Image (cartoon, helix red, strand yellow):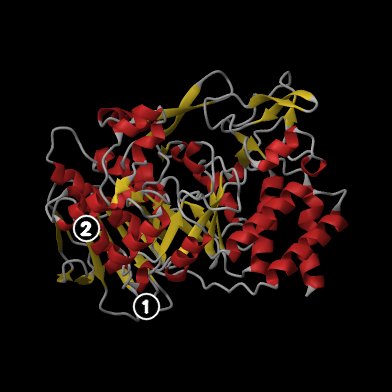
Amino acid sequence: MLNPLLNKLEPLVRQLYPNEVAEVCEEIITLIIHYQDRHLPTQSWVNQRDVVLITYGDSILKQGEKPLRTLYHFMSRHLWDSVNAVHILPCFPYTSDDGFSVEDYKQVNPELGDWDDIAVLASEYDVMLDAVINHISRWSYWFRRYLVGDPEYDNFFISADPELDYSKVTRPRALPLLTEFDSHEGKKWIWTTFSDDQIDLNYSNPKVMLAVLDVLCSYCEQGARMIRADAIGFIWKKLGTSCMHLPETHAAIQLMRLVLDEVAPGTILVSETNVPHKDNISYFGNGYNEAQMVYQFPLPPLVVYSFLTCNAEKLSRWAGNLDMLSPMTSYFNFLASHDGIGMRPIEGILTEDDKNLLMEQTYRQGGQVSFKNNGDGTKSPYELNICMLDMLSLQGEEPEVGIKRMIAAHGILLSMMGIPAIYIHSLLGSRNDIEGMTGSGIPRRINRAKLRLSDIEQQLMQHDSERSKVFSGIRQLVMARKRLSAFAPQAEQKIQMYDPRVFSIQRYNALTGGHVLSLVNLSDDEIDLEPNFQGVDVLTDTTINHFVKLKPFQVCWIKSPNEIRNKKGW
């Protein structure tokens, strides 16, 4: 076993740590053997029944109960037959940034629950845990020991000279790159890409890599089916470069993937890189050696833009160029998350006027726009901070119209090649939390409200409430998707252009013969189409014979009656 493993391990270690190859390989192999002895289960690949709920551990609260237990009870009562996976956003002790400044990677935040609560969720759902491994809290044990000169943590962080030129470094936020700290050696300037409470780890030190690999393996041991690598594109620093997407970064991810494959085969590594599409999909590597899934960041702004303009052409052109790199890769599709709607991923896809349209809609609907430094003294929009239901609603119209857009938008999400993930505030039809945003001064809090379980359940029982309408509409789509093999993540897709107001996509599963035509009306017009496609609309149980009449914002999924058909010419 060791020789084949060593043959795969050595080239990666040599690229990252050329002067310590033998020692580092030996320590990694020791780590692998340690976790292999735990006999962690092998995981299977994904299919059309996989739908992920994105949520904080405390998005839903019940007095007197730990939030992770409340989350489990909510999912068991309301999502047991529709959602089969849950992405729990950072659930560790933290000091800022709503969990993304982790104090201790190996503990569950006691305010949320404990590892037993994670185990209960993992017993019935596939769990995704966050690996916030570009940086760690300034109050973490690692950084505190570094500041006092503990040799175990020497060089764990990046000491920098503030007089040098850092203008090429990619800046995700309009904050200083370096932060001054008092240390046992006096004043030190330390690399802090995201904030002064998020201290970048120094991956050029192999001890850091080994510590992080141990953290990742421990998440598998605690039941993680998927691991989300937060801000992974930033992890390797090299002055004079952008410090993004460096060859060493990709080698580091390949090393993580190799170790996870050995320890818990089938564990899915998901890269989170809010960057232009070409850079984003580079984290697939060769299709077998880096992330199995990448976040599909262009999808949210493109879907919103398409509904605002009632035009599918730009979304269709982008979607028509998508392809799977290998049978073992997939897109992680989403419309909303705990963060805002990213603007960088649409560079080269939408024009400046198009971006201005999105920003104007955000401001009109009570949201905010966050900006990033460009390194040349200018700033550009980084993300739109707003709830998706508000973003898809227009001033002066009946609330019902925004609800229809919201459900139709999820019709697009659920029909696309890849695995769909639905943010809890989208599923529950939440509106902007203006008080949370203004009270904290944090724009992202607009989409991170904490909800009382009793309120949610009461509103879901009221069939005329916004929450109930959005929840039941999206849930109906999810339930239908799970029955259609044509929506398997690997099934092929082909874009059709019947009418610019309609997003039209064909999905075909060569293994089962499953064939579906998805039509989504982006407008409030009634539209007559002749797609020359026969079958049954599984959402309305209506027989379709070459002709379709789409109501405003209608989603139509036409299943071909011929399950086994010749793929040629489809």
Position of 501 compared to 221: left or right? Answer: left
The amino acid type found where label 1 is placed reads: Gly
Task: Using the image as rendered, state which of residue 309 and residue 40 is in the foreground.
Answer: 40
Residue 382: assigned label: none
Task: Using the image as rendered, state which of residue 265 and residue 557 is in the foreground.
Answer: 265
Q: Which residue is mark 1?
A: 513
SS type, badge 2: helix
Position of 436 compared to 553: left or right? Answer: right
Q: Quadrant of residue 262?
A: bottom right
Whole-angstrom CA distance, mark 1 to mark 2, is 28 Å
* 534 lies above or below 323: below
Name the residue located 22 percent from the left edge and 53 percent from the top edge: 470
Query: The N terminus appears in which quarter of the rendering?
Result: bottom right
* 478 lies above or below 235: below
Q: Earlier in the sequence, mark 1 or mark 2?
A: 2
| Residue 264 position in % (x across, y down) | 62, 69
| Residue 505 position in % (x across, y down) | 32, 59
Q: Which residue is mark 2?
A: 473
